[in-house]
Image (cartoon, rainbow, N blue to C red):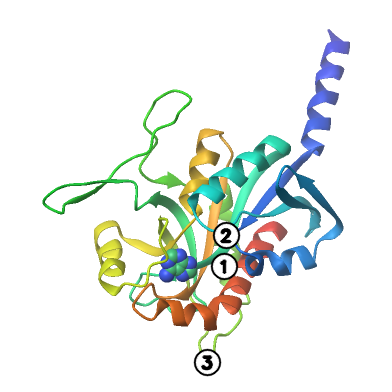
């Protein structure tokens, strides 16, 4: 009995030691500062993906570039979970701000996230966003995937003292709320307003809900952290070029503060 207990204790301790925090960005610019600061960096190729193992803020992490869009995000998240024991997933990257006060460089912490393009589009142009389905059990997923409460609490705790990068004269603000994901780079003020008014989404991007769906189905806690590179309006593609880098850095600053916490 006692030996059994010791054996079980050893097994669970060893598997805990093997755990890593998965940090995902879509584009190289969204993870560069993290991979450059990784301690004991090891580059691991698995199937057609590259993983960066090491320590950040004394935590074991594995960093991955997922690629742009929902299919790339779901595929690479599935491979990440196949290859590693992932204790939690943190997504870091840029987004189009939808809140009327959101400016480039502002951070949006997703407390929930949904697919805005998984929908029934009716003949009368009514557009009904629908929940996805879990292929393992045919059950409907929630419409909104909710971020992990512990990770959210850590974010809330570090936000007041977070040193963000100024964008021009602007001291970035931090929002916490809903994020809308779709396979579309939104550069359309009418649709941007519709997403904000209909769903209360504060930002839009192209990967978060796909990662959240895989994480939810595999019971892995997650959080999505984004910073605004643009406002998803008619100028979004121009603003994106100017503000993508400082925005990516602001999201990373919050990720590092959460890891420290
Ligand atoms: N990522 C950054 N800006 C975006 C936008 N306007 N639409 C979708 N994804 C984005």
Q: Which residue is drawn at 17% across and 47% down?
A: 122
213 to 235, vertically: above or below = above
Q: What element carries label 1?
A: helix
Q: Mark 3 points at which residue?
A: 169
236 relative position to 38: left or right: left
Specify which label sits upstream in the sequence, 1 or 3.
1
Label 1, label 3: how far apart the Cα atoms are: 20 Å
Residue 159 - label:
1
Residue 138 in the image: state x and y as whole percent: 40, 25
Q: Which residue lies furthest to the left in this view?
A: 124
Residue 229 - label:
none
Quadrant of the snapshot with the N terminus: top right
Q: Is residue 139 shown to the viewer in this render?
A: yes
47 to 182, vertically: above or below = above
Marks 1,2: beta carbons within 8 A = yes
Compare residues 258 and 207 and report the one nearer the observer.
207
Assign ligand 1 to one image quadrant.
bottom left
Q: Residue at x 84, y 12 (%)?
A: 4
120 to 57, vertically: above or below = above
254 relative position to 199: left or right: right
Label 3, label 2: how far apart the Cα atoms are: 25 Å
Q: Which residue is drawn at 13% across and 48% down?
A: 123
Compare residues 226 and 148 and report the one nearer the observer.
226
Q: Which residue is drawn at 62% across and 46% down?
A: 76
Specify which label sits upstream in the sequence, 3 or 2.
2
Q: Mark 2 points at which residue?
A: 155
């Amino acid at each position: 009995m006692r030996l059994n207990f010791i054996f079980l204790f050893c097994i669970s301790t060893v598997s805990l030691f093997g755990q890593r925090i998965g940090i995902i960005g879509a584009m190289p610019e969204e993870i560069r500062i993290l991979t450059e600061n990784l301690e004991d960096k090891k580059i691991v190729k698995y199937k057609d993906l590259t993983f960066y193992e090491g320590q950040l803020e004394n935590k074991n992490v594995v960093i991955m570039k997922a690629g742009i869009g929902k299919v790339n995000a779901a595929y690479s998240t599935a491979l990440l979970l196949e290859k590693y024991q992932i204790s939690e997933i943190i997504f870091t990257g840029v987004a189009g701000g939808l809140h009327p006060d959101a400016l480039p460089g502002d951070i949006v912490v997703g407390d929930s996230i949904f697919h805005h393009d998984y929908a029934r589009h009716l003949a009368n142009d009514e557009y009904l966003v629908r929940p996805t389905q879990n292929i393992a059990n045919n059950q409907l997923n929630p419409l909104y995937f909710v971020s992990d409460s512990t990770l959210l609490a850590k974010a809330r705790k570090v936000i007041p003292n977070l040193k963000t990068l100024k964008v021009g004269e602007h001291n970035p603000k931090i929002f916490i709320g809903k994020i809308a994901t779709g396979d579309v780079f939104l550069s359309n003020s009418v649709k941007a307003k519709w997403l904000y008014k209909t769903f209360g989404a504060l930002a839009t991007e192209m990967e978060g809900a796909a990662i959240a769906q895989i994480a939810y189905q595999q019971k892995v806690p997650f959080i999505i952290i984004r910073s605004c590179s643009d406002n998803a309006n008619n100028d979004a593609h121009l603003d994106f070029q100017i503000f993508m880098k400082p925005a990516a850095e602001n999201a990373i600053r919050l990720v590092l503060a959460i890891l420290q916490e």
